[in-house]
Image (cartoon, rainbow, N blue to C red):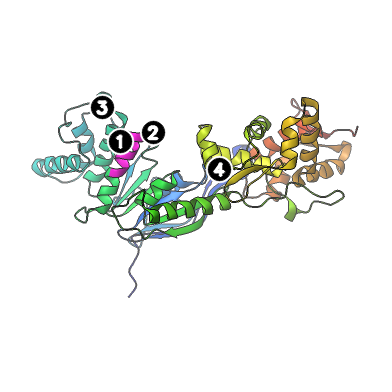
Amino acid sequence: MSIEPLISLEKVCLEFPGEKGAPPTVILDDINLTVAENDIIALLGPSGCGKSTLIRLVAGLLAPTHGVVKFHGKPVQGVCPGVAMVFQNFALFPWLTVADNVRMPLEAMDLDEEDLERRVKRTLEMVSLNGYENIYPREISGGMKQRVGIARALAANPEVLCMDEPFSALDVLTAESLRDEIGRLCADPANPLRTMISVTHNIEEAVYLAKRVIVLTTHPGRIAMDIPNPLPYPRDTEAPEFRKIVEEIHALLTHHALPETRPGLSAGETPGVATLSPLPEATLGEILGLVSLCEETPVDLFELADSLREDFDSMLRVVKAAEMLGLVTTPTDNVVLTPLGRRFQTANAAERKRLLGAQIRGLGVMQWLMQYLAAQNEQTITVEELMRELKKLFPRESVERQSRILLRFANFGQLIKYDSPNKSITLAKAG
């Protein structure tokens, strides 16, 4: 007999209404996921892929547009009583003491005072906060505030703990210490809470905590990979087996996020819909900055993001844009200058503009735009019309974002003239 999953998401889709009659923005699409009792899951993926939205759907803080979220086989309607949330920004009541913050969710439960106090004391001890009962949030560090948030979530004895990047607002040492605390709870067979879903950008953190690592793609968010992690608790981050899984997920995540892309079209080739790729959200200044930082030897993408103190997702978008323009390639998880990229590095300003303009003109989506404009009366369209056509080409992308990036690139390449007051786009005359 099959065992009913604790949580199931079946063909879940979440959309947000578009502005001023624009089509809705799809945040999550066709999410199918089951969570068994004692599962510990980490959600990985780029910013905007819907990780935080997904756990809010599980907790009942959001309702899906389509599909259903079930808890113990029954559809979730409103806040799910068996799920507790830990937020990135602590979300404590500053006018309440540590003990009173933990006590708050218990007030609605039918508990006598003795049982209530016993629960508060027990949960504070679980996260090493005994002795801080009468302190106010303003008097404690960020790490201790997050411990209070975790204690408050645990106090109600939930069946599932959802954590939305619980360590990202903390310094490295505090985050590592608190991560170890959660790891201790995962490893403790006496701990009644053994089912957790955590959002993170950190691969090592995911491998340290999770039994399954779920990788999501973006625009819209979809599950790309479900990776089991069989390592026993407690886990040693320096163990060869641990490092191997981190490196495998690292390679899988980077390869999935940086698929092979066509930088442009051959001379005379007509762009069909199948050849077109949406443009990553990156400015030309960011792309040029990336090229100027690259050296002869390959640079690890993750190390590059760390050295620049950039969010990995932002760095990824810039690298993808530079790759589409033929300035870099990305074998495995490295960033390598192409011959054109090396030439670009040493060129003067005028030569750089000419080279970049030629690469922009070669992009499939740019040739599509020029051909579309050439076929119109007076070779002019409105921004609204452009957005309608982009929606047909890239139904899963934000048309507002794509039109903004497309016009920015086309304007730099002197391929169009943009009339801002009238929001109209005209094909630039050749020469």
**Residue 64, relative to residue 4: is it above or below?**
above
Dot 4 surroundings within 10 Å: few (below 14), some, or many (20 or more)? some
Seen from the viewer's position, the closer of residues 403 and 241 is 241
Which residue type does callout 2 highlight?
Answer: Ala
Q: Which mark is residue 300?
A: 4
- 397 with respect to 267 (left or right): left
The mark nearer the N terminus, 4 or 1, is 1
Dot 3 and dot 1 residues touching (CB under 8 Å): no
Q: Which residue is mark 3?
A: 140
Dot 3 and dot 4 residues touching (CB under 8 Å): no
Which residue type does callout 4 highlight?
Answer: Asp
Q: CA distance from mark 2 to mark 4?
A: 25 Å
Q: CA distance from mark 3 to mark 1?
A: 10 Å
Q: CA distance from mark 2 to mark 3?
A: 15 Å
Q: Which residue is mark 1?
A: 146
Q: Nearer the viewer, mark 3 or mark 4?
A: 4
Seen from the viewer's position, the closer of residues 241 and 198 is 241
Q: Which residues are magenta?
A: 171-180
Classify the position of the N terminus by image quarter.
bottom left
Point out the residue furthest to the left here.
114
Dot 1 and dot 2 residues touching (CB under 8 Å): yes
Residue 234 highlighted magenta (yes or no):
no
Q: Which mark is residue 169?
A: 2
Dot 1 surroundings within 10 Å: few (below 14), some, or many (20 or more)? many
Name the element at disc 3: loop
Seen from the viewer's position, the closer of residues 311 and 160 is 311
The mark nearer the N terminus, 3 or 4, is 3
The mark nearer the N terminus, 2 or 4, is 2
**Residue 303, relative to residue 162: is it above or below?**
above
Q: Which mark is residue 25?
A: none
